[in-house]
Image (cartoon, grey):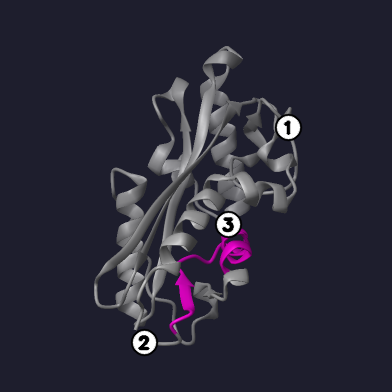
Amino acid sequence: MSDSREVLLATGNPHKLDEVRAVLSPLGWTVLGLDDLDGPTPPEPEEDGDTFEANARSKALAYAAATGRLALADDSGLEVDALGGAPGVRSARFAGVDGDRATRDAANNRLLVERLRGTEASDRTARFVCAMCLAGPDGRILAETRGTFDGVIVLEPRGSNGFGYDPHLLLPGDGCTSAELSPEEKNARSHRGAATRAMAEAMAGLEIA
C-alpha cells in the first residue's frame, strides 16, 4: 500500500475535495482526488443502492480494490419532506439531464422548484445527508460515518458559494442559505463537514499497515 497517511477520496468534484481536505489535511493526511491518480481513472461503480450508505460503501470498496489504496467515498444528497424524502439517493440525477456539473445542477434545481411550487414554506423542511465510508484494498470496511445539515427549501436561489442545491437550502436560524455561507462556515456546519470530522476521529484510531 502507499503512504499510510495518504487516502484517495473517490471523487473528481473539486468542491468535495476542498471540504474534505480542510478537515483531514491539518491532521496530517494527504487527500488525493481521482484526478491525481497516474494512468486511467478506474471506472465509477454504478450507484444503485437504496441508501446513501450503500452507495458510499460500494464506491469506497471499488476504488480501494482498483487502486490498491486506502479509499474514502461519500454519497450525499438532499431529502425534502414534502417530496417524501426525494430526491434522496437520486439527488445528482434528479432531472435526468446529461452534461457538465453546472448543467446538471441547474436542471436539478429547476425540477426541485417546480415540484415544490404551491407548497407552504413550513412544509418544505429538508436536509442534506452525507454518508461516508473508508475501505482498504483488502476489501475491509474500516469506518462509516453520517452527517446531516437541516433547513427549509426556498424557491428563489440565493448565494453563489457551494454547489448543487446549496442556493435553495435556507438555514432558518441564520436567515441565509447554504450558498451564502463562506466556505469555512459551511465546512464547520455542513453534512459533509460533520461526516468528515467523525471520520477523522475514526481514522485517528485505526491501525493502518
- Left or right of 35? Residue 85 is left
Q: Residue at x 32, y 74 (%)?
A: 136
Number of residues whose C-alpha sits closer than 10 Å to that of mark 1, classed few (under 14), some (14–19) or many (20 or more): some
Q: Is residue 165 visible?
A: yes
Query: At 57% across and 40% down in the image, what residue appears?
Result: 107
* Mark nearer the N terminus (3 vs 1): 3
Rendered location of residue 83, percent (x, y): 43, 24
The verdict on residue 14 being magenta is: yes
**Point 51% across, 29% down: residue:** 126
* Displayed quadrant of residue 149: top right
- In the image, which disc is placed on residue 1? 2
| Residue occupied by mark 1 | 176
Q: Amino acid at mark 2?
A: Met
> Looking at the picture, how far across and down is residue 168, in whole percent?
64, 33
Residue 163 location (% of width, % of height): 63, 48
Q: CA distance from mark 3 to mark 2?
A: 33 Å
**Which structural element holds mark 3?**
loop
Rendered image quadrant of residue 30 = bottom right
Q: Residue 186: x, y in percent?
A: 66, 47
Q: Read off the residue under disc 3.
A: 100
| Mark nearer the N terminus (3 vs 2) | 2
Mark closer to the observer (3, 1) = 1
Q: Is residue 127 left or right of residue 169?
A: left
Q: Earlier in the sequence, mark 1 or mark 2?
A: 2
Q: Work out which residue is located at the far left of the displayed protein and give it.
A: 139
Q: Residues in magenta? A: 4-24
Q: Is residue 96 visible?
A: no
Q: Does the CB distance between marks 3 and 1 fall below 8 Å?
A: no
- Above or below, comparing residue 89 to residue 7 in the picture: above
**Amino acid at the residue labelled 1:** Cys
